[in-house]
Amino acid sequence: MTPLHRRLLAEAVGTLLLLATVVGSGIMGVALSNGNDGIALLANAGATAGMLYVLIVVLGPISGAHFNPAVTLVMRLRGEMASGDALAYIAVQVVAAVAGVVLAHAMFDQALLQPGTHARSGGAQWVSEGVATCGLLLTILLGARYRPKAIPVLVASYIFAAYWFTASTSFANPAVTLARSLTQSFAGIRPQDVGGFVLAQLAGALIAIGIARLLLARGETTSARG
């Protein structure tokens, strides 16, 4: 197994670049879209999906390319990580996510930390985050069983789609949610809305574990392997 310090470095680099992409592409998308939210969202979704594909391909062999406390939590609950390693992963992901937002602001010559002002609250938003996170985890868990080599494109494709079919634009990541409360860009969220999002994301992750256990029951095979 890769030493922990190298895995943590990979998680830090990946999470930082992911948040720099989410926030930076949001800023650029708005600047170039002339007020067209659809174009801004397309730019944001496309850039995020593209970066996810690259990061999973190049960093996955080192750390597993979690970049997401919900993913790390699920791996711990499934017995695939030690508790100490999981806590270290989550701490690094949160710090690196904040650093990624700061980096994006620096690249666009903006205030480095900006308390979010974009309201994202209410039942529809919370259900969206539960669905987005559950779907992401199922994509990872089922992909790992049946199409492990395709996980980069599966995850990237799912996130691109989830930007469009969820009312919340699919944060699906507690570290991302917390970090995005520090930007007033298109990608931001108000600090007071973070708690609801994170709870919904954790609920979605736990539901994904249950569904995966049913779908991946031991001793059963599938004929749909293409």
Image (spheres, helix red, strand yellow):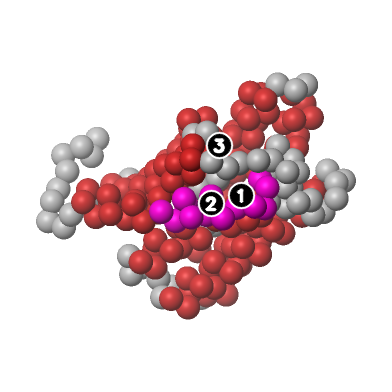
User: Between marks 3 and 2, how big is the CA–CA gap?
Assistant: 15 Å
- Mark 3 or mark 2: which is in front? 2
Q: Label 3 amino acid?
A: Thr
Q: Picture coordinates of residue 184 (x, y %)?
A: 75, 44
| Disc 3 + disc 2, Cβ < 8 Å | no
User: Between marks 1 and 2, how big is the CA–CA gap?
Assistant: 6 Å
- Magenta region: which residues? 189-203
Identify which residue, 33 or 224, lies in the foreground.
33
| Disc 1 + disc 2, Cβ < 8 Å | yes
Element type at mark 2? helix
Q: Which mark is on residue 193?
A: 1
Identify which residue, 68 or 128, lies in the foreground.
128
* Residue that sits furthest to the bottom in the current view: 84
* Quadrant of image for the N terminus: bottom left
Q: Which residue is mark 2?
A: 196
* Residue that sits furthest to the front in the current view: 122
Q: Residue at x 46, y 50 (%)?
A: 200
User: Between marks 3 and 1, how big is the CA–CA gap?
Assistant: 14 Å
